[in-house]
Image (cartoon, rainbow, N blue to C red):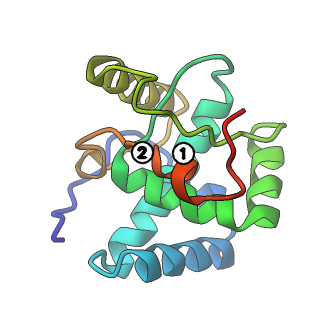
Amino acid sequence: MTIALERPVGTTDPMTLLDPEVAERLAHRVVTDHPEISADTARRIVGQAAAFIAASGQQPGQNLAPSALVDFGWHAFVLHTVDYAAFCERTVGRFVHHIPTGDEDASADEAQQARERALTAITAAGFSIYPELWPDVAECTQCHAGCTDSPIT
């Protein structure tokens, strides 16, 4: 996968939210799970995931969705539970849950609206956005089929 990286929109690099060691560990996980993604792009994905988590945590009760690429970063972060829980507590003041959706949960239009709300929340929080990492919305249904620690609640 080749992705041309453009100049980000916004003011604050979301990588500043992360400890550099944690950021590198997460980027390595993204590349390990998705070898078609370069290390540089993986770092940007991790930064966008951090911005998404921080911004969505400030929007309780809202339905916000990441892009497919940003979801790779969120999944990598969730797997590192100690780091993820500490990040959520430090940036949001509470744990931000990852709640996969089922195919029947939202129409394509509603999913795109949830992605747009996420981008608006990230921008409002002052974080940079790399638009090329947000071309679509994640279809996060695989967790119900494969992740034994993410039951439907």
Q: Is residue 10 above or below residue 71?
A: above
Q: Which residue is mark 1?
A: 51
Front in this rendered view, residue 112 or 133: 112
Query: Marks 2 and 1: which is nearer the front?
Result: 1
The amino acid beneath tag 1 is: Ala
Q: Is residue 145 visible?
A: yes
Q: Is residue 11 above or below residue 38?
A: above
Q: Name the residue rendered at 25%, 53% in the picture.
A: 7
Q: Which of the image's four quarters has the C terminus?
A: top right
Front in this rendered view, residue 139 or 90: 139
Q: Earlier in the sequence, mark 2 or mark 1?
A: 1
Residue contact at pointers 2 and 1, CB within 8 angstroms: yes
Front in this rendered view, residue 146 or 23: 146
- CA gap between label 2 and label 1 equals 8 Å
Q: Is residue 18 visible?
A: no
Q: Name the residue rendered at 67%, 79% in the picture.
A: 21
> In this image, 133 relative to 71: left or right?
left
**Percent x, y for residue 72?**
45, 60
Tell me the SS state at disc 2.
loop
Q: Which of the image's four quarters has the N terminus?
A: bottom left
Q: Is residue 63 above or below residue 89?
A: above
Q: Which residue is mark 2?
A: 128
**Percent x, y for residue 70?**
42, 52
**Percent x, y for residue 94?**
83, 37
Question: Would you call the spot at circle 1 few (<14 residues within 10 Å), some (14-19), or many (20 or more)?
Answer: many
> In this image, 59 relative to 71: left or right?
right
The amino acid beneath tag 2 is: Ser
> In this image, 43 relative to 57: left or right?
left
Task: Residue 111: name its quadrant.
Answer: top left
Q: Name the residue rendered at 20%, 55% in the picture.
A: 6
**Percent x, y for residue 33?**
44, 76
